[in-house]
């Protein structure tokens, strides 16, 4: 029985892997599993929570910009309609006071008033704005919950100790006492 030279060379020889390649393989063997085990969750969740808070502030700004303008628009339309209606009533009164020698038929047509529709639109906009704020707050609360949970649970707790010691728990959204009262909309 004869062993070929190609087959015998592989049995006794040891292949030598260069140290650099071995180090690279070891590094990849450590880094690749870490990439999927949540090492980046803490900064990601922190940024999500910050972005969610920015959205809450965005909705507050939207409300501050929108509501006063809507109220003024509705007030202006209501004032215009009040003046128009008063002019129609005055004109009607004058026609009734006129004495004509012959019979005259007077047909009255009142203007199409839309103040009620404007008030309904304002009400819908106020409700929609408050709903947007509520959704933004809910999203912020959820983002903070996710971030804080990551800091307190495994493996996030380990990553926080090893790599992210400067990251601290975020405060949840809280409302002050004034927010517990319903705001009033004043048309005066």
Image (tube, rainbow, N blue to C red):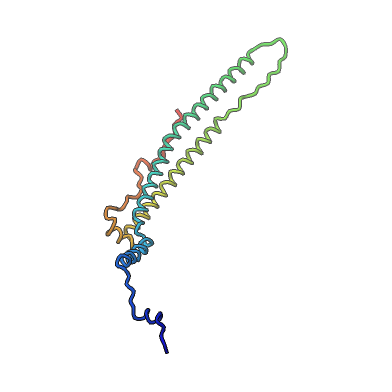
Residue 149's place in the image compared with 126, above or below, is below
Where residue 74 appears, as percent x and y from the top left, is 50, 30
Name above or below for residue 15 compared with residue 24: below
Q: Quadrant of the N terminus?
A: bottom left
Q: Can residue 177 be seen by looking at this rendering?
A: yes
Instruction: Give me the residue at 44% from left, 32% from top.
Output: 68
Q: Position of residue 154 (x, y in %)?
A: 33, 63
How many numbered marks appear?
Answer: 0
Q: Nearer the viewer, residue 137 or 94?
A: 137
Q: Quadrant of the C terminus?
A: top left
| Residue 106 located left or right of residue 13 | right
Which residue is farthest bottom?
1
Residue occupying image coordinates x 52% and y 27%:
77
Q: Is residue 154 visible?
A: no
**Front-most of residues 141 and 121:** 141
What is the x, y in percent for residue 26? 32, 66
- Where is residue 24? Give x, y as percent: 33, 64
180 vs 76: above or below: below
Q: Residue furthest top?
A: 101
Residue pictured at 40% horizontal, 79% vertical: 6
User: In this image, 17 relative to 86: left or right?
Assistant: left
In the displayed structure, 12 sits above or below 23; it is below
- Residue at horizontal 53 percent and vertical 36 percent from the top: 121
């Amino acid at each position: 029985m004869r062993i070929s030279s190609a087959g015998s060379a592989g049995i006794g020889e040891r292949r030598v892997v260069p140290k650099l390649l071995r180090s690279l393989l070891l590094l990849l063997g450590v880094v690749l599993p870490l990439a999927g085990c949540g090492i980046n969750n803490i900064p990601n969740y922190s940024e999500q929570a910050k972005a969610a808070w920015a959205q809450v502030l965005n909705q507050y700004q939207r409300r501050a910009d929108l509501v006063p303008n809507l109220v003024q628009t509705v007030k202006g339309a209501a004032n215009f309609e009040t003046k128009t209606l008063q002019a129609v009533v005055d004109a009607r009164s004058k026609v009734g006071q006129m004495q004509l020698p012959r019979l005259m038929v007077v047909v009255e047509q009142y203007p199409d008033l839309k103040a009620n529709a404007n008030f309904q639109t304002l009400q819908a906009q106020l409700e929609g704005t408050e709903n947007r704020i509520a959704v933004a707050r809910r999203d912020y609360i959820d983002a903070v919950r996710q971030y804080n949970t990551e800091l307190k649970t495994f493996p996030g707790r380990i990553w926080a100790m090893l790599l992210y010691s400067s990251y601290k728990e975020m405060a949840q959204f809280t409302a002050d006492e004034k927010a517990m009262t319903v705001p009033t909309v004043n048309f005066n």
